[in-house]
Image (tube, helix red, strand yellow):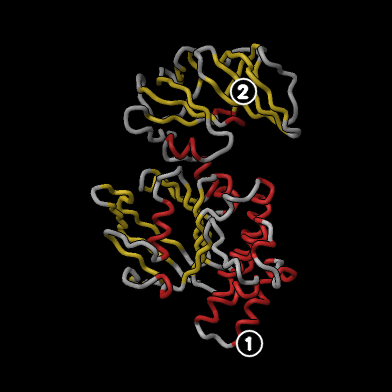
Amino acid sequence: MSNLSLRGIVRDYGALRVIHGIDLDVSEGEFVVFVGPSGCGKSTLLRIIAGLDRPSGGDVLIDGIRVNDRSAAERGLAMVFQSYALYPHMTVRQNLAFGLENQRMARAEIDRRIADAARMLQIEHLLARKPGQLSGGQRQRVAIGRTVTREPGIFLFDEPLSNLDAELRVQMRVELSTLHKRLKATMIYVTHDQTEAMTMADRIVVLRAGRVEQAGPPLVLYNTPANRFVAGFIGSPRMNFLPAEIALDGQIAVTGLGAIALPGFAAAAGDAVTLGVRPEHFDFCDAGGLPGTVDLVEHMGGESYVYMTLGNGERITVRRPGQTGLRRGTAAKIAIVDAQAHLFRTQDGEVAVGRI
């Protein structure tokens, strides 16, 4: 296992800066996920770590040693790509052995590593097959197995599950998490899918436009997002946002709907804010609350998603356990459960407003 440090990493393409001075430490054995929308710089950052791209400024350190001038092969890393990158004319066994044979490793050691990886990833019965005879999930296991046989200091994953169907993605998330626990390995994983990030990561790094918006454990980001961007990106269904203003005596005036009680925020009366409420923190009420009309109800079995248009035209999602008798066109009122809400300042980049 190895640790990783990034110090002031910058990447320019001509006059365009795509990575803006990123500092980050990844501890030995940690599973860190880079997440963000397309074009945020997460894959570029991973390529810089891997040695497949050079930073325009800053340093990459592995186990405290600067590796900017080391090739990808000299860094002790192994990378799993979205496209699998398997040799189609080779068997699974030959694919697993190829990199080790190039290192002139002893045959007995190669066989041991292949056997260990195949057993761990449950691909022992596939060793004689070629990639064209495998399913997408099996190919991905082989691609992961190839990195396991190298016994790298750090595993790098660049959106490895994006080509798989929904059921296989769930299965592979479980398998990757299990692999991490077995190997106690340092893993850095890139995805645009926040569900993958939430379910696998020890720590999530949220990127936007080449900058780190927030880094921390999944539930910390979910419960205490640093700004509106993180709040909207982490969580599914996404957080609801409503324009509002701080009123007097702990009241929040929701634009076009009236005031609701929401005490305890460190903001002054008159401040323009955005009210953020997760779908599970809304509930239906008989009196008071915010009025709206039901547009659609999705019954998921153990829970229901209710999509509504409020009286001011804003659309929201309510997630409630169990089933509901609400139907399209039903008038309903919603309230915030136990004041579980967030405020984001409109005037300074939607930074979260702290509690008093």
Using the rendered view, name the quadrant where residue 324 is placed: top right
| 344, 114: nearer the viewer | 114
Q: CA distance from mark 2 to mark 1?
A: 60 Å
Q: Residue at x 63, y 87 (%)?
A: 108
Residue annotated with mark 1: 108
Q: Residue 121 has which mark? A: none
In contact (CB < 8 Å): disc 2 and disc 1: no
Within-10-Å neighbours for mark 1: few <14, some 14–19, many 20+ = few
Residue 290 spot, x, y in % from top left: 56, 16
Outermost residue on the left side: it is 15
Q: Residues within 10 Å of mark 2 (few under 14, many from 20)?
A: many
- Which of the two residues, 150 or 213, is positioned nearer the viewer here? 150
Identify the residue shown where x is 55% and y is 54%: 201
Q: Is residue 23 above or below residue 249?
A: below
- The residue to which callout 2 is attached is 307
Determine the image quadrant of residue 166.
top right
| Rendered residue at 41%/60% (across/down) | 47
The spot of residue 208 in percent (x, y) is 39, 43
Residue 337 appears in which quarter of the rendering? top right
Question: Quick one: 22 or 250, which is closer to the camera?
Answer: 22
The location of residue 182, given as percent across then percent down, is 64, 68
Q: Position of residue 249 (x, y in %)?
A: 43, 19
Q: Amino acid at mark 1?
A: Ala
Query: Looking at numbered disc 2 in the image, what kind of residue is underneath it?
Result: Tyr
